[in-house]
Amino acid sequence: MNKYEIKVVLLSGLLLSSFLFALLYNAFSRKIDTPACIPYNAAFEKGHVRQLDDSTCEVYVSAHMWGFDPAEIVIPVGTTVEFYLTSTDVVHGFNIDGKGVNLMAVPGGVNRITVPFNSIGTYRIVCHEFCGIGHQNMMGKIIVKDKIYQQ
Amino acid sequence: MTISPAYRKTILFGLFMPMTLFILGVYNGIMQTIYRAGVIHRTSVAGINYYQGLTLHGVINAIVLTTFFAVVFGHVTVSFYLKKEPPKWTYLMSMLLMVVGTLMDAFTMLAGTSEALYTFYAPLQDSPLFYIGTALLIIGSWIAFGGWVKVWFEWRRENSGKKMPLAVLGTFVNFTMWFMSTLPVAYEVLVILTPWSLGWTNQVNVPLTRMLFWMFGHPLVYFWLLPAYIAYYTILPKVAGGKLYSGNAARLAFLLFLILSTPVGVHHQFSEPVFTPGTKFWVSILTFGVAIPSFMTAFTVGASLEYAGRKRGAKGLFGWMARLPWFQQENFLFGYFICGLILFIFGGLSGIVNASYSLNQMVHNTSWVPGHFHMTVAGPVLLVILGVSLYIYSTVAGKTIKFRTLATIVPYLWMFGVALLSHGMMAGGLMGEPRRTNMGMTYTNPDSDLFNKHWVATSTTTMIGGFVMGAAALLYFISFFATATGKRTMEPVIELPESEDLHEEKPVPLLLNMRPWIIVSAILILFTYIPALISVFKYSAPVRNKFQVENPNNMIK
Ligand code: HEM
Ligand SMILES: [Cu+2]
Ligand SMILES: [Cu+2]
């Protein structure tokens, strides 16, 4: 290997190191991380929403062929949501449109991620893992409402 | 080198059968783009439903065609460089198992009993014949490797002091990696899924099966790619009219693949529960590491091409590009190679996005992902398969290539089609368009509640790209099958264009011995997968789920 080749190896190493640095920076300073895992427990298979206080809530989502439970999640704007996701049958996907939330729902495992919802609107959840013949019908919704209309 | 009739027939059959199946693979690819663009709103066409077609597409194109080619190309490189045929029983047995396995898979996919796509994720259940067939295909490829190893030891005894030829090193690295990484998937299909599918067991640990699958799934993509790299290093410089810039750099690149390609499978599972962020970040680092041999390849191959251009009298910084043998019939292989390389620049860069830990969440399982890998597996991998298959068929059968003009323009047309297809899918993916989805039924159907207008334009671009690729494939099939069914006009030989090294380089002992690299590879695999396995058992539980694709009711009561 001559000097050009060694330079190429060093340069590509440097480039990739700068990418790695960007990932670390985002994970630590901006809290953009991959989903975390928690031990599996069959209690997660029941979908429901639990409001903790004014600005935080826990949403337990259970995916099944071919829908999500709860099918519609309604929360007040400004809520930070902690999602817990599992599946009661086969593997499903859970991709919230426009939010960069991208999870797999795996039977026998529980996925978790925290997401703030700071603007009003309807967010669609698309199942993006093949889960059988009705896969293309599988969609959920998150409706983020103005606080005043909540009650 | 002359060739015995049995060996010749094995090689030719190993090219002909998968290429025939590939017609079905291409057909289903084109159909997918039509469904997805919302041109048709149907569950099935001509008796094949969307997901059955997608299973056929993935299995035939990505597992059958690629594995057969790796084995046949291995036969040809090993025999050409070592001037020996492997023991007869190994190549016959290997081909027999691969053919039987493929027929079993094809039969169950067409019968509709195996439609869980080429990743066969449990708890969707396929027919046991599918799992066994896939295992036979893999085991058949191991046996071919066994034959080459035997021939290699003989050659080394007779040629002491000589270096292992580069193409043979590449082939051996590829199959060593393949052997190590197919053990987990063999365990998955034979020990876990087959008894489960037969009804002997009812429980399955889904995260465990997924981990085992991806221990194989990533090395699989390098198994597709390395034959193309071997061709880029040992054939392309010759057909471009130049020399290989550095043989040692090529050896180092292959050996780096050997250590880094298996322990990175978890990078397909960044969005999944069960693995800790630590494991995920670690495989992100390793995956960036495995990008380095690809950067090196880009440099070495680029430098070899520049040398070729300058030798033909090119001036200036970029003049050499114009002097390369574009669109030349006598030199049709060059087009296949260069178009593959151009696509791979974009395939590689988009791959770095996928590998990037949290950034992966923007693209995971969206159509960005098939957009990316059609620029790799349907790019350099497929184009090298097509070009070299035609070349090998013609030399080994002793038949002249028919419709050379068509065969010459195929790669350029194909490249244009892939560019459109991938552009459409990647743009859609960034807007959340899901992969593996019959979108025409809902998301691109204006009558559905789920309609999303943003995905119409992107999936339409994809479809146009699909049509162009289909046209290129058709031209190729005309040339290939006309050649294959033509009359013999020459003596059958095993023959490959052989590049020389540009510089005489000092042999580096570490680059001539695979053993230390295999040991490092095993250490890295344990270092990555022991923690991953511990997480699987800590965070997940087996489930009593077994489902058929058409039916949302659990088969286990
Ligand atoms: C005429 C050429 C082709 C067209 C039009 C085409 C089109 C497509 C499309 C639209 C998808 C995505 C379908 C979906 O996710 O719903 C897809 C998936 C795929 N294609 Fe192709 N493709 C072609 C050639 C190839 C080739 C040559 C290969 C490999 C050698 C290949 C390998 C794959 C694989 C592995 C998948 C993923 C299957 C899965 O998600 O289970 N394709 N193709
Ligand atoms: Cu689903
Ligand atoms: Cu990978």
Image: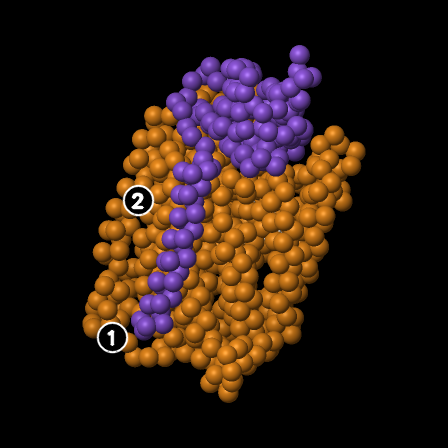
Chain colours: A purple, B orange
Residue B549 position in % (x across, y down): 59, 30
Q: Is residue A48 visible?
A: yes
Residue plotted at (41% across, 78% down): B243
Quarter-wise, where is residue B467 in the image? bottom right
- What's the mark number on residue B506? 1
Residue of label 2: B525
Q: What secondary structure is found at the residue carrying circle 2?
A: helix
Q: Residue at x 51, y 65 (%)?
A: B341
How packed is label 1: few (under 14 Cα within 10 Å), some, or many (20 or more)?
few
Identify the chain of the residue marked 2, using the numbered disc in the image: B
Query: How far apart, in angstroms, are the residues tagged by discs 2 and 1?
Result: 32 Å
User: What amino acid is found at the position of numbered circle 1 in the picture?
Assistant: Lys
Residue B536 in percent (x, y) is at 36, 30
Q: What residue lies at 39% left-to-right and 75% top-to-bottom?
A: B244
Q: Quadrant of the C terminus of chain A?
A: top right
Relative to B3, does residue B134 appear above or below in the rendering? above
Spot occupied by residue B365 in the image (x, y as percentages of width and height): 55, 40
Q: Chain of mark 1?
A: B
Q: Which mark is residue B132?
A: none
* Residue at far right of view: B447
Position above or below: B245 against A118: below
The image shows residue B26 at horizontal and vertical percentages of 63, 53
User: Which quarter of the figure is the N terminus of chain A placed in?
Assistant: bottom left
Q: Which residue type carries mark 2?
A: Ile
SS of the residue under disc 1: loop
User: Image quadrant of residue B162?
Assistant: bottom left
**Neighbourhood count class around disc 2 (C-alpha, 10 Å): few under 14, some 14–19, many 20 upward:** many
* Image side of residue B536 versus residue B272, left or right: left
